[in-house]
Structures are given as C-alpha cells and as structure tokens.
Image (tube, helix red, strand yellow):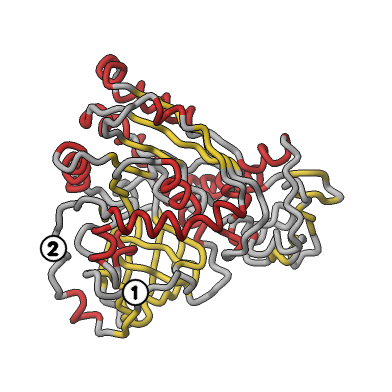
Amino acid sequence: MKIKMIKADAADILSRPPIKHERPKKQSKLLRAVVSAASKKELSDTEFTYDGKGFDQLGKRPCLVLMNHSCFLDLKAAFRMIKRPFSIVCTSDGFVGKPSLMYSLGCIPTEKFVPDYSLVRDIKFALNKLGQSVLMYPEASYSFDGTATPLPDSVGALIKLLKVPVVTVITHGAFLHDPLYNGLRLRRVKVTADTDLTFTQDSISKMTADEINAVLKDRFSFNAFEEQRNNKIAVTEDFRAIGLERVLYKCPVCKCEGGIKGDGTEVKCTCGASWTLSEYGELVSDRGITTVPEWFAWEREQVRKEILSDEYGLDIEVEIGIMTDVKAIYDVGRGRLTHDKNGFVLKTADGKEIFKQSPVYSYSVYSDYFWYEIADMVCIGDRNKLFYCFPVDKTVPVAKIRLAAEELYKLNKKK
C-alpha cells in the first residue's frame, strides 16, 4: 500500500489550519461487499476459520469489537466475521488521498498514541445514532515481536462510558503469516480467530474500569512464537529471518547496536555471533536456544537500565513528513529528532523547533517498519499535526525508540 507524498515548504505547512472534523457515516453496503470480495483470496490462502460464538450471542444489537493487531489480514478477517454494519477506528493517515472512500467504508479517523477526546464522541455517535457496531484495535499498532503490545488504561473507562456489549477477537497465526519486520513477505500459515462476548451490559455495570482492564489484559496476552513452537506450526519459507534486525537490534553477545542483520533463515552480528531461526520459531545457536520475544524483552530491560543510569539519548538526522490534512503527507526536508528523559524534540534543518512532546504525553509512540513501503519511521504529534520522522541512518532502530518512550512513560507516571 502506498501513500501520496508532496514536497513542500515547512513554514507553509505549519501555518495551515488543522483538519476539519467530520462525523462518522453509515457503512456503504456496496463498499462492504467489495472489500469482502477482495479479501477472499488471502483468507482462502490462510484457510481462515473462526469461532463466531461471541457474535452469535448478541443478536442484532450494536457492540464494541476489540481485536488484536498483527497484520493487515486482521481487517480482512473482520469483514468475514462481523456480519452487521460496523464502523472502523483507524489511523488518520489511512485517509490521505481517499477521505470519501474511507468515510463511506465506515472508518473513523484517529491518531495513534495521541489523546483524542473527539474519538469517544464519534464512537458514541456510530453506536447510538447510526446503530452500527464499532471495530477497534486497542493495541493501536502492529505487534513487533508477536506478543501483545500495551493496552491504554483508558479502555476500561471507555467501555464503562459506552455501556454496550463488548466482543473480543483474538487471531492465531496472523503474525506468523505476515510479521511486520519481514517486509510484506507472506508465509503459508493457517489463520484462525476466536471470538468471545467478554462483557455484557449487565457485567459492565457491576465492574470498575480497573477490573475491566484486568480482564482485557488477560484476554490480550498471547505469544505467537510460543504458539508456533507448542503447536508445531512450521514456517518453511527461506526468507523468514529477513528484517529481524528491526526487532533484534542489539546483540546479546557483544552488546552493540547496528551490527545485527537478518538474512534468509539466519540472524548474524558483525561480532561473529549467529542464530538460525528454525521452522518452529526458535533462535538456535551454539549458545543455546532463545526466542524473538525473549530477546525483545531483554532489549526492553537494557533500555530501562540506560534510562535509569541517565545514559539513554537519541539525536538523529531525519527526513520529515507532516500530515495536516488528508490531501497528502508533506515532505518538508531534513531535520533533527532528539529523545531523552525530557521527551521528544523535533527541529528543522535550520534549527527551528517545530514540535516538543513530553514523556508523559502518551504511554507509547507510533513506530513502524517500512511505513507505506517508504521506510522505517517514528511519528509524534497532536490532533492538529503529525510529524513522520524517517531516520537518515537506516540502522537506527525505531523499535528502541518505542521501547524507550514506553519505559519513560512508566517511570514518569510513577513520579
């Protein structure tokens, strides 16, 4: 999938007014049918099946659907499973170049990891005025390592406020079919989903927001690599390790960053250490066996130690893209992005500060690999403007930036 980018002057783009808010629209039956038809091949290739009991217990009442997020197949699966009109909470950059189409499909735009109070009103409007169910991916971003990404504490409060039944959907095999790090290389893996009527209107009224969050945390606890190993799911493609350096950016042997490379079925470091990604998802070496989630968890610990010892800091040259409307992403040239205990600061090439973001602004940050087939990036911003930062040095790990943002949020929240 591509996105429209236009070269522009930073001062001009920054002076433009923010996007005008629009209310959600009824989902077009025609577009729904078109998307469903276009989704058939990939769903067929993955032999997709699902347990629909969560929806069967609802009847025709509108509900909130919370689904885990592994790859783009998730949305195609949703069109197969949700047999009723529904709105889709999605990232606002998905509207660039095609706003009318997206609104007609029932999409509700929002910004990832940006406080958005208008989103609550839009969801209520879709449920109560349009009579549509609402699909939301509470993780907000694709999983990097095949495990659940943090859920915002606000989900419990949202469910209490909406007072509608909640169906949760957890897919199995979707991450193995199309892991974000592997650069859109699809694997032949069977995908299934289980649905559950997790909260009824009655149960919601008897629970606190914290109790709801605890149930969701348990429901959204999964490990794709563990499932692969336990169920002997073979991924036989010879490209399965390509791009793994995006996740496994720090070598556990030499402790250096930037020297790791995933190629074919091997993960190698310039220090000489190497691992083979087995058909069953294990990283095998003469030092023993580990897994991608275990390595990624170790990297998180290392980032936290850097922060606590005041050693963490990012200062990189980036290409800057700005979203201030849905016509295009505006390429305004190069600048510098810094990140430390005080948060993010973004400056243009001439040193002008154009955005600052505190460490407690959000519990995570929007980082992505091969964003719209352009490059790895990290995005900061607010409801008025979003700033897409593409590191000029391609070895800079955007995964580490996300881990650092999450750990800085936790530490500062405690204070």
Taking the image as shown, residue 173 lies to the left or right of residue 76, namely: right
Please tell me how crowded label 1 is: few (under 14), some (14-19), or many (20+) other residues with Cα within 10 Å.
many
In front: label 2 or label 1: 2
Q: Residue furthest right?
A: 286
- Which mark sits nearer the N-terminus, 2 or 1? 2
Inter-mark Cα distance, 2 to 1: 20 Å
Whether residue 28 is visible here, answered yes or no, is yes
Which residue sits at x=45%, y=57%?
A: 37
Whether residue 107 is visible here, answered yes or no, is no
How many labels were placed on the picture?
Answer: 2
Amino acid bearing label 2: Lys
Which residue sits at x=53%, y=37%?
A: 50
Which residue sits at x=51%, y=32%?
A: 51
Q: Which residue is mark 1?
A: 321
Please tell me how crowded label 2 is: few (under 14), some (14-19), or many (20+) other residues with Cα within 10 Å.
few
Q: Which residue is mark 2?
A: 20
Locate residue 47, reporting x and y percent.
61, 47
Res 203 quadrant in image: top left
Locate residue 160, reporting x and y percent.
24, 27
- Mark 1: secondary structure: strand
- Mark 2: secondary structure: loop
- Pick the front one: 95 or 305: 95
Quarter of the image that includes the C terminus = top left
Locate residue 308, reporting x and y percent.
48, 45
Amino acid bearing label 1: Gly
Quarter of the image that includes the N terminus = bottom left
- Pick the front one: 14 or 108: 108
Locate residue 178, reporting x and y percent.
58, 56
Q: Vertical placement of 3 versus 201: above or below?
A: below
Taking the image as shown, residue 203 lies to the left or right of residue 219, namely: left
Res 379 quadrant in image: bottom left
